[in-house]
Image: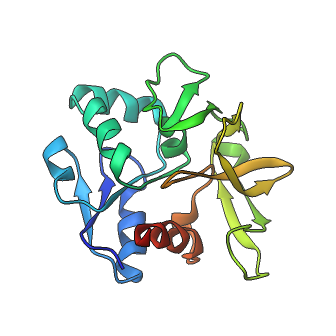
C-alpha cells in the first residue's frame, strides 16, 4: 500500500499518537524533526498541537519551504493545528501557513481548552453508517473554501474534514480515538 515510511512532524503536539495509529495500521512511521528527515517519506502528517508554537518551530528549523515543496508531490494530512498550518490564510498573523489548502483557518473556533468536547459525526468518505466520535480540543473552523476543496465531513453545518488534491485536513483529533477510518482514507490516496 505505502511504498515508504510516513513522516509525522514531531516538533510539538500529539505526534506520537499518529505514529501509534500508523503502526496499528501496519504502516512504517518516521518522526520528522529536520528537513533531512523528509527524505524517502511517502507522505507526512502534521499533528495537532499549538499552531503558533509549531509555526515558530518550523521557522526556527528553516523548514517552511521544504515542507511546502514536499507537499507539492506527496500527500499531507493535518489535524487541528495541522489543518491551520495547511491553510492558505489564518486569522492570526503569528502563524505562517504553508498554503496547501485554498481556505482560511479560524483558530480556536470551537472554544478554549475548557470547552473541549466529543461529538458524533458522519464521514462522507466512509460507507459505514457508524458515526465517528470526533474529539474537538481548541479546534479550528474553515471558511472561504476554494475551487477543488471537497468537504468530507461536517459538524453543526461546518466543514470539519477537507480533501484537496492528495491532502486531507481534519479540524479535530482523530488520533485520540481508536477509530482509524480517517487515517485509512488518507492512506488509500497513496494508491493513486
Q: Which colour scheme is used?
A: rainbow
Left or right, 30 with reference to 21: left
Answer above or below: position of 60 versus 82.
above
Asked whether residue 66 is in view, the answer is yes
Left or right, 165 with reference to 126: left
What is the quadrant of residue 132 in the picture? bottom right
Whole-percent x and y of residue 124?
74, 67
Residue in the picture at 58% in, 75% down? 181
Whole-percent x and y of residue 164?
57, 49
Nearer the observer, 87 or 155: 87
Whole-percent x and y of residue 32?
24, 52
Quadrant for the N terminus, please: bottom left
Answer above or below: position of 66 versus 189.
above
Residue in the picture at 65% in, 40% down? 140
Residue, far right:
157
Left or right, 127 with reference to 184: right
Residue in the picture at 44% in, 68% down? 192
Asked whether residue 106 is in view, the answer is no
Whole-percent x and y of residue 169?
56, 51
Nearer the observer, 59 or 36: 36
Nearer the observer, 187 or 116: 187
Amino acid at each position: 500500500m505505502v511504498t515508504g515510511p510516513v513522516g509525522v512532524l514531531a516538533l510539538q503536539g500529539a505526534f506520537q499518537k499518529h505514529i501509534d495509529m500508523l503502526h496499528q495500521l501496519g504502516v512504517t512511521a518516521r518522526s520528522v524533526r529536520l528537513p533531512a528527515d523528509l527524505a524517502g517519506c511517502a507522505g507526512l502528517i502534521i499533528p495537532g498541537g499549538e499552531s503558533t508554537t509549531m509555526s515558530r518551530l518550523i521557522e526556527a528549523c528553516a523548514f517552511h519551504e521544504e515542507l511546502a515543496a514536499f507537499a507539492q508531490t506527496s500527500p499531507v494530512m493535518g489535524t487541528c493545528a495541522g489543518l491551520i498550518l495547511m491553510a492558505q490564510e489564518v486569522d492570526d498573523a503569528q502563524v505562517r501557513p504553508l498554503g496547501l489548502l485554498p481556505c482560511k483557518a479560524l483558530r480556536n473556533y470551537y472554544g478554549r481548552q475548557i470547552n473541549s468536547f466529543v461529538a458524533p459525526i458522519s464521514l462522507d468518505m466512509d460507507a459505514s453508517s457508524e458515526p465517528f466520535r470526533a474529539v474537538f480540543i481548541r479546534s479550528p473552523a474553515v471558511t472561504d473554501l476554494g475551487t477543488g476543496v471537497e468537504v468530507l465531513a461536517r459538524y453543526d453545518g461546518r466543514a470539519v474534514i477537507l480533501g484537496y488534491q492528495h491532502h486531507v485536513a481534519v479540524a479535530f483529533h482523530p488520533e485520540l480515538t481508536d477509530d482509524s477510518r480517517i487515517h485509512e482514507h488518507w492512506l488509500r490516496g497513496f494508491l493513486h
